Image (cartoon, rainbow, N blue to C red):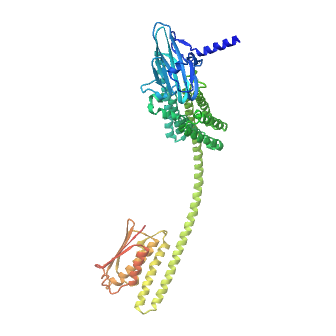
């Protein structure tokens, strides 16, 4: 029993004692935590004076790193005792090797110095917080750290550095980080260029993924806080940590959906969409609330695992593109796993492989870029094969269409020939019928002695002849679309001269052909105008008639003028003839008519040919 009590007292006494570290012969970098003692203040209210009264409450530590995860409810105190047995003063730098801890206060026995994520000095250009310490010759000094983190995970690691070696290491560290970010940025620019060339959305989603990774890692390693973000917005930026973590995951998910054509797998695609929606909802919850804040990285981790499953599933389904990115997906997955374990304080990969995360990101980016390049080559090969098939199909289709067009052309030619023959036959029959009517009128005219009625019948006969001659021209012509107006008017002039037994000179100036419908109405109008001139303009049967028909833009003009006695001096007037002319012009041509009686009669008719 006595032995048991003595063992217990020895262990208690050991736990209350703080190991003294002799720095007189130490060089380079030393891990301080194994030489420190720890006290956890669960009240968050103890001051440095209170802590000094609790010396026996401190517990010795043997771990290089202490991780408490998201721990806003308590404060960790770390006690260090450094001894200098030499005859010279020793200057050292204590580095707090975690840039994301929000509140750090360092007590050196004389003064206190505050640092941490929410208290970064504007002049600081070191990634991690550092504290300068001096131990005089043949002396011992005690230091305290007051550590708490109410926004990020609380991970504690302390390093003791020789001043010169710390500066050299810091320059090397920042240079390597600059190479990392520069490499990622170059890959992003490279993929942007390829996107504009190919218009493939996979590239732009991958660019967003790279940019999201850059933003996330700038925050994760602390570069963003000392070079880019003003101190007054760091708190709000850190409060959005769930969004920063999820941003590259979202981009990676959309890249995977498009690159591997995930929508073709309906259930897989539905689950992925559901997870993305849940992750988006979780971001909103974690940004605006502290509820379950300790689990804010769960959904990004779940989505990352599911994306690996999706890639494996695509590879099993013989999706060639999945083979290229599967290895890269595993690399980045392990990177996220190690970052998650580090944030929880469970395992710090940096103790064994300082730049594992950066190398993993670059390696994954290179693999994905190679996969995208391979996709271009694959698509180009498929495009060439498709072009060859298309060319062959085009040639076959061209031959088929050529044969089909020849057959259709022959059918159309036969149909047109039949239509032409039919139209000619119709015109011939119409002309014959009209000539029959004219013959009947002439027979009736021969039996009438009244000159007035004979004149009426002659007028009717001439009008019918005007239409009959048009059908005669159409019957004899191969062109059934347009009418040779000059030929048509010459026939009408000969007919009227024969009918009135006049030898009046008629001069034609015609520069346009007319469509059939216009030619019919124009022939009737011309017939009436020339009849009026022959009947009333020249009592002595001596005179001249000028006829012009031309087209100006879309306007057609018919001008008939004579040098007779004039309209107002005429002894007779053909009221029905003028009424017929006006009706044809206004109703059928939608045109205008202008009659002038100066040195004869001039009739000008205009209509639109559109």
Viewer-nearest residue: 15 or 420: 15
Q: Is residue 480 above or below residue 288?
A: below
Q: Is residue 588 visible?
A: yes
> In the rendered view, does 453 fall on the left or right side of 201?
left
In this rendered view, identify the residue nearer to me: 452 or 323. Answer: 323
Instruction: Give me the residue at 46% from left, 75% from top.
Output: 470
Image quarter in which the N terminus is found: top right
174 lies left or right of 341: left
Quick check: 209 above or below 558?
Answer: above
**In this picture, is 204 found above or below 117?**
below
Residue sitting at the far bottom: 449
Quadrant assignment, res 263: top right
Total marks placed: 0
- Across and down, in percent, residue 577 comes to 40, 82
Residue 259, quarter of picture = top right
Q: List x then y, in percent, for residue 427.
A: 51, 75
Report x, y in % for residue 127. Answer: 48, 24
Quadrant of image for the C terminus: bottom left
Instruction: Report the residue that reaches farthest toward the left.
Output: 599
Q: Could one spot residue 491 in this view of the protein?
A: no
Relative to 221, does residue 252 appear above or below in the rendering? below
Give the camera-side residue of 501 and 609.
609
């Amino acid at each position: 029993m006595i032995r048991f009590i003595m063992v217990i007292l020895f262990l208690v006494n050991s736990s209350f004692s703080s190991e003294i570290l002799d720095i007189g012969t130490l060089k380079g970098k030393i891990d301080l935590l194994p030489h420190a003692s720890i006290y956890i203040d669960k009240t968050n209210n103890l001051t440095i004076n209170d802590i000094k009264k609790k010396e026996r409450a401190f517990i010795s530590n043997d771990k290089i790193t202490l991780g408490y995860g998201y721990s806003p409810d308590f404060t960790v105190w770390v006690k260090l005792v450094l001894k200098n047995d030499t005859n010279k003063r020793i200057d050292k730098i204590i580095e707090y090797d975690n840039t994301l801890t929000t509140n750090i206060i360092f007590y050196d026995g004389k003064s206190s110095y505050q640092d941490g994520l929410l208290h970064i000095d504007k002049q600081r250009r070191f990634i991690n917080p550092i504290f300068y310490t001096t131990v005089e010759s043949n002396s011992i000094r005690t230091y305290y750290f007051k550590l708490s983190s109410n926004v990020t995970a609380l991970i504690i690691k302390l390093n003791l550095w020789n001043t010169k070696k710390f500066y050299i290491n810091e320059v090397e560290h920042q240079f390597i980080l600059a190479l990392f970010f520069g490499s990622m940025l170059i890959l992003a620019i490279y993929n942007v260029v390829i996107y504009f060339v190919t218009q493939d959305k996979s590239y732009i989603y991958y660019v967003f993924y790279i940019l999201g990774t850059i933003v996330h890692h700038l925050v994760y390693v602390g570069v963003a806080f000392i070079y880019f973000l003003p101190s007054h917005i760091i708190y709000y930026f850190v409060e959005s940590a769930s969004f920063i973590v999820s941003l590259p995951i979202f981009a990676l998910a959309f890249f995977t959906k498009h690159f591997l054509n995930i929508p073709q797998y309906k259930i897989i695609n539905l689950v992925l969409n559901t997870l993305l929606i849940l992750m988006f909802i979780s971001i909103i919850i974690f940004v605006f609330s502290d509820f379950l804040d300790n689990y804010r990285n769960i959904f990004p981790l779940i989505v990352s695992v599911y994306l690996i499953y999706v890639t494996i599933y695509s590879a099993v389904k013989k999706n060639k593109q999945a083979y290229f990115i599967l290895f890269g997906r595993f690399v980045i997955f392990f990177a996220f796993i190690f970052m998650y374990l580090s944030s929880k304080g469970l395992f710090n990969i940096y103790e064994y492989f300082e730049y594992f995360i950066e190398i993993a990101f670059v390696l994954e980016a290179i693999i994905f870029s190679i996969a995208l390049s391979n996709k271009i080559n694959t698509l180009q090969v498929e495009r060439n094969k498709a072009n060859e098939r298309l060319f062959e199909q085009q040639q076959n289709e061209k031959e088929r269409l050529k044969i089909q067009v020849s057959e259709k052309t022959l059918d159309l030619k036969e149909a047109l020939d039949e239509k032409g023959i039919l139209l000619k036959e119709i015109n011939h029959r119409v002309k014959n019928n009209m000539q029959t009517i004219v013959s009947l009128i002439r027979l009736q005219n021969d039996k009438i002695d009244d000159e007035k009625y004979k004149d009426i019948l002659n007028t009717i006969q001439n009008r019918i002849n005007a239409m009959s001659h048009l059908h005669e021209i159409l019957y004899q012509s191969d062109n059934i679309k347009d009418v040779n107006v000059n030929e048509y008017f010459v026939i009408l002039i000969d007919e009227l001269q024969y009918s009135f037994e006049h030898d009046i000179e008629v001069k034609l100036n015609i520069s346009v052909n007319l469509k059939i419908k216009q030619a019919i109405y124009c022939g009737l109008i011309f017939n009436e105008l020339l009849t009026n001139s022959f009947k009333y303009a020249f009592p002595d049967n001596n005179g001249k008639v000028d006829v012009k028909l031309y087209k100006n833009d879309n306007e057609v003009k018919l001008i008939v003028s004579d040098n007779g006695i004039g309209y107002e001096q005429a002894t007779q007037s053909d009221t029905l003839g003028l009424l017929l002319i006006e009706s044809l012009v206004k109703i059928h041509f939608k045109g205008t008519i202008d009659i002038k009686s100066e040195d004869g009669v001039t009739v000008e008719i205009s209509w639109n040919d559109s």
